[in-house]
Image (cartoon, rainbow, N blue to C red):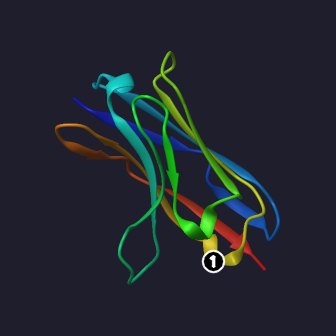
Amino acid sequence: QVQLVESGGGLVQTGGSLRLSCTASGIDFSMHVMGWYRQTPGSQRELVAVTTANGRTTYAAPVKGRFTISRDNAKNTLYLQMNSLRPEDTAVYYCSARRDAHYWGQGTQVTVSS
């Protein structure tokens, strides 16, 4: 059974930082494209950042230069370091694992107050 468990969300002031973690089980973590997505009420889920099996990273334009995605294959864990947070970063953040199938975590709320 595949499980992706996110943690690290919370409430932070504008300009603050948070670090999200996603621990995976039931998959060959090192072989999967891992990513972070986010969603606000009434909007579609949008890509934040992804990292491929060989460590290549891609970021959405709104977070480039502020967020950093990384992975620790030995710990089956994906991270998202979020700096210089803005109110528009407020969303539920989801961890994603994709190879032959696409798996999702349950999400973690990030709220940035102005």
Q: Quadrant of the C terminus?
A: bottom right
Give percent across and percent down for residue 10: 66, 57
As rendered, which of 10 and 17 lies closer to the eye?
17
Q: Residue at x 62, y 63 (%)?
A: 63
Residue 90 lies in what quarter of the image?
Answer: bottom right
Q: Residues within 10 Å of mark 1 (few under 14, many from 20)?
A: few
As rendered, which of 32 and 9 lies closer to the eye?
32
As rendered, which of 14 and 107 lies closer to the eye?
14
Mark 1: which secondary structure? helix
Q: Is residue 101 left or right of residue 32?
A: left
In the displayed structure, would residue 17 be above or below residue 96? below
Residue 99 lies in what quarter of the image?
Answer: top left
Q: Residue at x 18, y 41 (%)?
A: 101
Q: Is residue 70 left or right of residue 16?
A: left
In the displayed structure, would residue 42 be above or below residue 24? below
Q: How many marks?
A: 1
Of all residues shown, which one is farthest toward the left?
Answer: 100
As rendered, which of 6 and 33 lies closer to the eye?
33
Of all residues shown, which one is farthest toward the bottom?
Answer: 42
Residue 7 lies in what quarter of the image?
Answer: top right
The residue at which mark 1 appears reads as 88
Of the residues shown, which amino acid type is indicated by label 1?
Answer: Glu
Q: Is residue 26 left or right of residue 65?
A: left
Give percent across and percent down for residue 105: 37, 47
Give percent across and percent down for residue 66: 71, 58
Q: Residue at x 75, y 75 (%)?
A: 113
Give percent across and percent down for residue 43: 39, 80
Q: Quadrant of the N terminus?
A: top left
